[in-house]
């Protein structure tokens, strides 16, 4: 098939939603100015660069109107925290996706515990094995054809990384297959990482390999 997005695709579901896959889950916790904890998943989340490490997430407008709580809280307090969404936490991730009033604490609703952050004061999901404490940098607002589709693209700098030692292999790599992170496939569909395979670019220089592996080089 071949179509222009503005003209429509003629299918019961939008193919665009399920082509760029799998998408990492940005399970983000924030605090409001009044100290209310918020927890919500975003499937438009990604690393931007690594030195210094920076990340981004994109949030559509809330169906309740205006910016989503995560965006507003990050802008007002200057912090947000990423929590790895795993297979074992999938139900909590799903519950925390509901559109709720700003005074609702999704940690309590999802049945997960709060662990104290060291840089931000924003609570982390205690049961999650990996966390980034992120300092808010900026928001880029992108217009759309309808209000709810407008996007707030939020960029942050990772100021502290937390990883459960149980998932660090002897060679220093993370045991991703044991972590079992989940990812979005579009619609209501998700996947889980249970198999890992390695591919090194043939003929790559030492500098190229160092960058891909995330290690320093002289």
Image (spheres, rainbow, N blue to C red):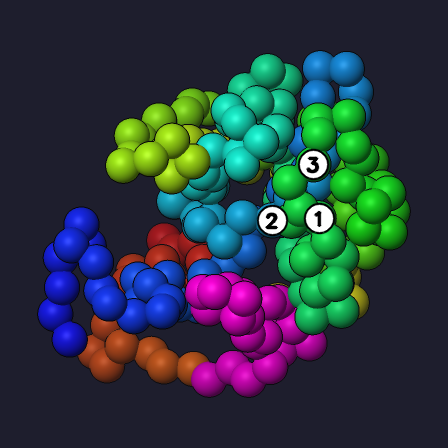
Return the residue nearer the eye: 25 or 195. Answer: 25
Disc 2 element: strand
**Residue 159 percent coordinates (x, y):** 59, 33
Q: Mark 2 or 3 closer to N-term?
A: 2
Q: CA distance from mark 2 to mark 3?
A: 13 Å
Identify the disc placed on residue 96.
1
The magenta segment is 174-197
Return the residue nearer the eye: 138 or 132. Answer: 138
Mark 3 closeness class: few <14, some 14–19, many ≥20 residues within 10 Å: some
Position of residue 127 in the picture relative to residue 214 (left or right):
right
Position of residue 73 in the picture relative to residue 112 (left or right):
left
**Residue 185 percent coordinates (x, y):** 46, 68
Q: Check if mark 2's residue and mark 1's residue have beta carbons within 8 Å.
A: yes
Q: Is residue 180 magenta?
A: yes
- Mark 3 highlights which residue? 100
Q: Mark 2 or 1 closer to N-term?
A: 2
Position of residue 123 in the picture relative to residue 216 (left or right):
right
Q: Check if mark 3's residue and mark 1's residue have beta carbons within 8 Å.
A: no
Disc 3 element: loop
Disc 1 element: loop
Q: Is residue 210 positioned above or below 180 on the image?
A: above
**Residue 175 percent coordinates (x, y):** 64, 73
């Amino acid at each position: 098939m071949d179509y222009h997005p503005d003209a429509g695709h003629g299918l019961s579901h939008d193919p665009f939603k399920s082509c760029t896959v799998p998408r990492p889950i940005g399970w983000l916790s924030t605090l409001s100015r009044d100290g209310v904890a918020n927890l919500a998943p975003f499937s438009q989340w990604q690393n931007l660069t690594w030195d210094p490490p920076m990340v981004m997430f994109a949030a559509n407008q809330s169906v309740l109107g205006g910016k989503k709580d995560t965006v507003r809280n990050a802008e007002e307090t200057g912090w947000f925290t990423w929590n790895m969404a795993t297979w074992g936490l999938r139900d909590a991730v799903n519950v925390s996706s509901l559109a709720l009033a700003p005074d609702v604490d999704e940690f309590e609703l999802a049945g997960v515990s709060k662990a104290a952050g060291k840089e931000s004061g924003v609570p982390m999901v205690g049961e999650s094995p990996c966390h980034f404490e992120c300092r808010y940098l900026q928001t880029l607002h992108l217009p759309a054809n309808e209000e709810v589709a407008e996007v707030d693209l939020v960029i942050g700098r990772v100021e502290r990384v937390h990883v459960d030692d149980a998932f660090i292999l002897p060679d220093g790599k993370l045991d991703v297959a044991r972590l079992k992170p989940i990812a979005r496939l579009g619609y209501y569909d998700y996947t889980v990482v249970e198999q890992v395979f390695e591919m090194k670019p043939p003929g790559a220089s030492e500098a190229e390999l160092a960058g891909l592996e995330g290690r320093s080089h002289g």
